[in-house]
Amino acid sequence: MPPLTSDLTLGAYLRAVRGRLSPESLGLPAGGLRRVAGLRREEVAVLGGLSVDYYTRLEQGREVSPGAAVLEGIADGLELEGDERDHLFTLAGLVAPPRGSRPATSASPALGQLLDSWSAHPAFVLDPAHDVLAANALARALYAPFERFDNLVRMTFLDPAAHRFHADWSRAADSTVASLRAATAEFGADPSLLSVVEDVRATSAEFETRWSAQRVQRKTLTAKRFLHDEVGPLAFDAHTFAVEGSSGLRLVVYRCEPGSATEQALTLLTARAADAARARQS
């Protein structure tokens, strides 16, 4: 397993993207038997309008200051869009904020009070490492099947409850890792984030496979499908918002359709959460 620091580079990202793309998907001939899957460096160079030598130096880290035009050519040639295109530029230092900035380490009391006021919507706050910094009672009741509601990455890959809880575990795992990978472009030096990656990577082969693929996707609006031990199937739209004034923090709010079976199940979860809170106080 390579050191994590070498994994968070422009060259590593280019190699991973090249390795997962087929020549046919980009309009190139298959070119006979290939020793390894994916595109050859020569093919990426042609697609990006670069010399093979220059592209090779990019992958090997011997060229560390490519211009925007070079990255545009590579992104266009590899058909990178959205978050993956942004990630390419950020790794090259061409997109603000600069890499290495430190995220906030706690949610403000006012934000915690806001979460608690939302009795009909599970809501919680995440940092770039996907640590849960604050959550309302309904979110805690929702994730009660897990041993701990502390870090979404560890929960997804290390807690046995995850495979039962997520209606499509593989999709949830893909999304979680792609979101974590996106955070590394801005917060790749954060000790908490590095610790999560290293710990889960060493324990879960399923995480390692996804991490090595270097897929990138920031969370904005995501469909969530759960199977809760106590109240059965649940369906949400998960909305994610940046917390202004708190670097790196994101507010996640789950919404369900009014009158749906999920809304009825949340009513039951709310009552059980209230009972649990009273039990803790007694």
Image: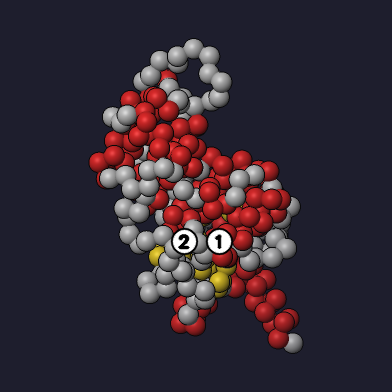
| Residue pictured at 56% horizontal, 42% vertical | 212
| Residue pictured at 53% horizontal, 25% vertical | 37
Coordinates of residue 170 in the picture (x, y in percent): 61, 42
Q: Secondary structure at mark 1?
A: helix
Tag count = 2
Q: Is residue 249 left or right of residue 174?
A: left
**Would residue 157 be seen by someone viewing this image from the given angle?**
no
Do the numbered discs 1 and 2 sit on residues whose CB atoms are within 8 Å? yes
Coordinates of residue 62 in the picture (x, y in percent): 41, 42
Judge by depth and name the residue closer to the eye, 189 or 29: 189
Coordinates of residue 114 in the picture (x, y in percent): 46, 77
Q: Is residue 24 left or right of residue 127?
A: left
| Residue pictured at 33% horizontal, 59% vertical | 96
Which residue in the structure is indicated by mark 1?
A: 193
- Badge 2 crowding class, 10 Å Cα cut-off, few under 14, some 14 to 19, many 20 or more, is many
Seen as rendered, the residue at the extreme left is 69
Which residue in the structure is indicated by mark 2?
A: 187
Judge by depth and name the residue closer to the eye, 139 or 83: 83
Question: What's the amino acid at mark 2?
Answer: Phe
